[in-house]
Image (spheres, rainbow, N blue to C red):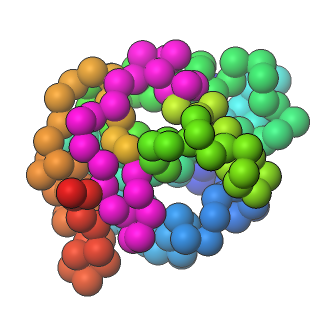
Amino acid sequence: MLTDAIERNQLENVRRLYEASFPKSEKKPFAFILQKQKEGFFDILAIEDDQGVFCGLAIMMLAGGLALLDYLAIDPDCQGGGIGSRTLAELGERYGKERIVVEIESTAGDGDCAEGEPDGEGAQRLRRKAFYLRNGMVPMDYLVDLFGVEMEVLTFGSALTFEQYYAIYREVLPKQMAGKIRLQP
């Protein structure tokens, strides 16, 4: 179940999982997210199980009529029970499936090099992509350089041009930050 993380304990749970789940190169300062939430550009959502226990987070960036699933993390103790899939379904109901956009680290070449990477990072990226594909998302036919990290863009099947995708960032981020997002050749 998705709830707006507005209570102090929910925000602290979200912050703690956020800090633990994402590489430094992919994290925005949490204070920035909180400020942009006040401006209406972010929804910070707590994911709870059927008993109301905190199990994860979803942070949505809202702009240009789109809802970018900027961050999704399920607590390791809650993984494997379908909470991630239920969360995607609830996000589809809340924002409209045709509006949801997801970014994942590129999987190009991961089938060949996953074993040689530390901690199986390539295998983890492949599992993440498979999760989104199983849940009905499809990759767009372009890659982006997102602050130096090659990313794939996925939607629930709605065609999305790079320009439409980039407009989200152009509207929300400071100009110098948005300028660091590029279409990969």
Residue 82 shown left or right of residue 133 in the figure: right
Quarter of the image for the N terminus: give it: top right
Whether residue 107 appears in magenta in the rendering, the answer is no
* Residue 22 image-quadrant placement: bottom right
* Residue 66 image-quadrant placement: top left
Question: Residue 125: horizontal and vertical position, in percent?
Answer: 59, 41
Whether residue 134 appears in magenta in the rendering, the answer is yes
Residue 107 shown left or right of residue 182 in the figure: right
Residue drawn at x 39%, y 23% as measured from the top left: 137
In the rendered image, is residue 9 in sight?
no
Residue drawn at x 68%, y 24% as measured from the top left: 83
Asked whether 46 or 88 is in front, the reply is 88
Question: Residue 93: horizontal and vertical position, in percent?
Answer: 40, 20
Q: Which residues are magenta?
A: 130-151
Question: Residue 140: horizontal and vertical position, in percent?
Answer: 27, 34
Question: Residue 106: horizontal and vertical position, in percent?
Answer: 45, 47
* Vertical relation: 97 (above or below) 105: above
Residue 33 shown left or right of residue 82 in the figure: left
